[in-house]
Image (cartoon, rainbow, N blue to C red):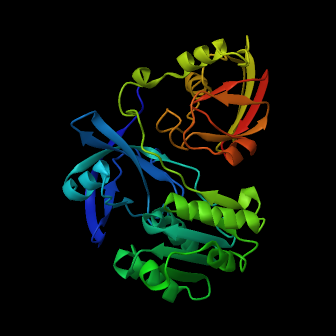
Amino acid sequence: MDIESFVLDVVDVVDETADARSISLAVPPGAEEKFAYRPGQFLTVAVPSDLTGVAARCYSLSSSPHDGGPLTVTVKRTAEGYASNWLCDHVEVGGSLRVLPPSGIFSPADLDRELLLFAGGSGVTPIMSIVRTALAHGAGRITVLYANRDEASVIFADELSRLAREHPDRLQVVHWLESVQGLPTAEQMRAVAAQHPAADAFVCGPAPFMKMVTGVLKELEFPRERRHQEKFVSLGGNPFGDVAELRQAEEEIEAAESEEGAEPMLAGPVKLEVELDGETHTFDDWDPKQTMLDFLEAKGVKAPFSCREGECSACAIRLLQGDMRMAHNDVLDEEDLEDGIRLGCQSHPLTDTVKVSYS
């Protein structure tokens, strides 16, 4: 089975800073449902590569899903980033990009709640989508702390200023410039977070920044359900090609079976109950050799996914009953695993009954 991808026309390109561009894409007629998205989600983009044919990269949507405008991703050029440099150098209005539909779980469950948003550098991209959407369709207060190297590096500077002026009672934007204030410290981030103990907190940016802020939130006893961070890794495979060439889960599981101490694979069949988009799907014939995603697709359930290699969070689910193990995981940390989060594209059952939720 091939992953369904789409070619979207480029309808606008805006230089946000000297090294960041916003690229707007038109959804083709008939694909509107496929490209319905939540604020904070991302697109997986195919970038031509002489070495591999295609380099697949995830870029967050900075647009709001509720303003009627095109889908917009914002890409910041990095020194060693082949894909980001190609997108910044070659994409123009009138061209096109091949993408997978929106994915990801970095999105508020309730736009009416108070939001505390930490962004570092280009990590402001999904934060901007959340801000735009929450201001237009929510009622809660929003605080944004945005860290950058210097003033020239601030993406969306004018837009953030405009929104703060138009919503003075709801939006506060705090800029942190390394050139003026130095690198942010845990103590300084703690002082900000401590003022919003009931907020839903979202963190996106460089890994050290996210680690520091997440550590502060834990120290302040923000519960797991109110702490969110976005993680991206470079996808190793090509999700735009033949999925059969990409799947290695069964081979890895079989290899794991032969290792000393490995848990034996269930004989099956397994009962599976899945909550997705307000519906509950129940099956009693899941073959443990199949990943959960493969099984659901075989049953006609349109479960979300992107890379199929355990390298993004598009297929993340939460365990409600039973247990599963993953053949591969490059994105979930120990706390995520302890909280019952798994990747559907890599998960095989460990118990006779498994119940999960995509919400």
Give how far across and how far down residue 140 sits, in percent. Answer: 67, 75
Residue 41 as seen in the image, left or right of residue 278: left
Q: Quadrant of the N terminus?
A: top left
Residue at 54% from the left image edge and 22% from the top image edge: 249
Q: Answer above or below: position of 182 versus 1.
A: below
- Residue at image location 64% in from the left, 44% down from the top: 277
Give the side of residue 305 with respect to residue 201, left or right.
Answer: left
Q: Tell me what residue is drawn at x 57 percent, y 36 percent.
A: 329
Residue 302 visible in the displayed image:
yes
Q: Quadrant of residue 17?
A: bottom left
- Residue situated in front as seen by the camera: 141 or 156: 156
Give the x, y percent position of residue 316: 61, 41
> With 2 as the anchor, is 253 left or right in this view?
right
Please name whichever residue, 245 or 79, is drawn nearer the observer in this view of the structure.
79
Q: Is residue 39 visible?
A: no
Q: In this orientation, which residue lies closer to the viewer: 119 or 170? A: 119
- Which percent across, then down, holds residue 189? 63, 75
Residue 84 at what x, y percent from top left? 31, 54
Q: Give the residue drawn at x 40%, y 21%.
A: 245
- The answer to whether 348 is drawn above or below residue 160 in the figure is above
Residue 57 position (above or below residue 90): above
Frontmost residue, 257 versus 130: 257
Count of number-bearing discs? 0
